[in-house]
Amino acid sequence: MRRMTTMKSWIGVGTTVATLLVVAPAMAEVRVGGVGGANLASLSTDEAGTKLGMLTRWGAGLALEVDVNESLAVTSRPMFVRRGAEIKTIAGLGDVSAQGSGSFARTELDYIELPVLLKYTLPTEGVRPYLIAGPTLGLRRGATVVSKIGSAAEERLDIKDEVKSTDWGLCAGAGVGSQIADSVHIFAEGVYTYGLTNINKNEVDGNTKNRGLQLRAGLTFSVGGR
């Protein structure tokens, strides 16, 4: 099962890269590189008695861009992204922090994220602001609830079988980029992801969706085109 999931992740990354290359016009500039940063993750839920908060996690991966014209590009950020949420209250237990010193609970979710985005860069010189938006597909890799209640030892509960293997969402954000050498670009951006999929396999568990604000930076190199 793990091998099949890994294969699905690589197929997804390959499909994303192939899509960008197919849409590339002749002589378009193509840039490839890396990206990483913090993910201010959260979950929305309608489960009665449960309150969730933000959990700071991280993500890292590739940066791919194909210019359509001077201002418009098709871009992707295939990344390993850690998501989840702090669990503040639990139905039947109440406030987690009130259960004793050091008590906590959190949900940790890991995904391979495959966005295909449009990027519009303002026609300025030097540091160039841009807007970015589009759909994203998340392939679930892991799902764990980590908790410590009162004087009990920390527990880790694997809930992967309770979380759907795919998660569709929408991304939108803004950033700034600059060319620092003939073929080297740097960028920094903030992108919010709004999950559209109820990630619970069992509908009885309520409606839970991923949310997250990624603050990331990266470096790309021109590998073709003008």
Image (cartoon, rainbow, N blue to C red):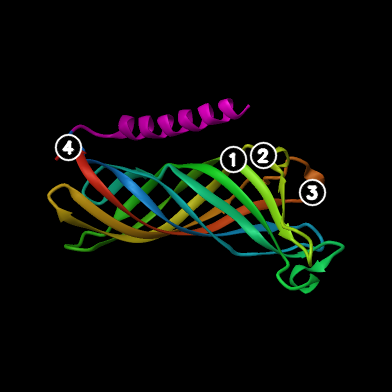
Estimate the x, y position of residue 86 in percent, counting from the top left: 66, 62
Q: Which residues are magenta?
A: 1-26
Residue at numbered disc 4: 225
| Disc with the residue nearer the chain's start (1 vs 3) | 1
Callout 4 amino acid: Gly
Task: Say what secondary structure mark 1 lies in.
Answer: strand
Of tags 2 and 4, which is closer to the observer? 2
| Disc with the residue nearer the chain's start (2 vs 3) | 2
Neighbourhood count class around disc 4 (C-alpha, 10 Å): few under 14, some 14–19, many 20 upward: some
Question: Residue at 19% across / 50% down in the picture?
Answer: 184
Neighbourhood count class around disc 1 (C-alpha, 10 Å): few under 14, some 14–19, many 20 upward: many
- Gap in Å between the C-alphas at discs 2 and 3? 12 Å
| Disc with the residue nearer the chain's start (2 vs 1) | 1
The residue closer to the viewer here, 100 or 145, is: 100
For the C terminus, the image quarter is: top left
Callout 2 amino acid: Lys
- Gap in Å between the C-alphas at discs 1 and 3? 18 Å
What's the mark number on residue 140? 1
Principal secondary structure, stretch drawn in magenta = helix
| Disc with the residue nearer the chain's start (2 vs 4) | 2
Task: Say what secondary structure mark 2 lies in.
Answer: loop
| Disc with the residue nearer the chain's start (4 vs 3) | 3
Estimate the x, y position of residue 157 in percent, counting from the top left: 73, 47
